[in-house]
Structure formats: C-alpha cells, structure tokens
Image (spheres, rainbow, N blue to C red):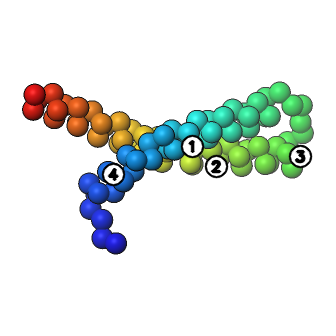
Amino acid sequence: MNWSREEFWERMEGFRVLWFCLAVADVLFGLVAVATLVVMPFDTSEPSVVIAVLDIAIVVVTLVPLTYVLYRLRQRQREKEARRATAE
C-alpha cells in the first residue's frame, strides 16, 4: 500500500486509546524498574541489576515514540477542532 501521511495519521487516530494504554503501561513498567533499583539492596554485579537497567533503557526507548505519536494525534485533533470552529 502506498499511504500518504494524512491517511497514515487518520488510521492512527482510530487507535488513540490503544496508544494511550501502551504509554501508561510503559510508564508503569518504568516505575517498577526504578522501584526495583531503589528499594532492593543489591550488589552492582548481580544479574537483577543488569536486567533492571536494561528494562529502564527499553522503557525510555519505547516511551519516546509513544509520546510522539500521542503528541501528533493531539495536534491533529486540535487542528480539526480549529477548522470546525472557523467553519461555523
């Protein structure tokens, strides 16, 4: 399929709730990983520390595009509302 940008973002608007739920889950996973590092006494050579740090890295890497998608969807929604307001 050869989609234009407009068609792509129109399609993504249908999944706005899913994008939001994914962002919330990502933040919760990040909080759990940070809590693991803060609360649990550990030695820096333990595998659990490595896993927690990798988890935080994955959360950050996935949260950036999720935030961008949500930002763009909100921006498009505001543009549509502005067009409706000027049309009335």
Question: Upstream in the sequence, badge 1 or badge 2?
Answer: 1
The answer to whether 50 is drawn above or below residue 33 in the figure is below
* Disc 4 secondary structure class: helix
Three-letter amino acid code of the residue under disc 4: Trp
Q: Which residue is mark 2?
A: 58
Three-letter amino acid code of the residue under disc 3: Glu
Question: Upstream in the sequence, badge 3 or badge 2?
Answer: 3
- Point 56% across, 48% down: residue: 62
- Point 17% across, 32% down: residue: 84
Q: Nearer the viewer, mark 2 or mark 4?
A: 4
The answer to whether 26 is drawn above or below residue 6 in the figure is above
Residue 64 appears in the figure: no
Three-letter amino acid code of the residue under disc 2: Ile
Q: Which residue is mark 4?
A: 9
Q: Which residue is mark 1?
A: 22
Q: Nearer the viewer, mark 1 or mark 2?
A: 1
Q: Which residue is mark 3?
A: 46
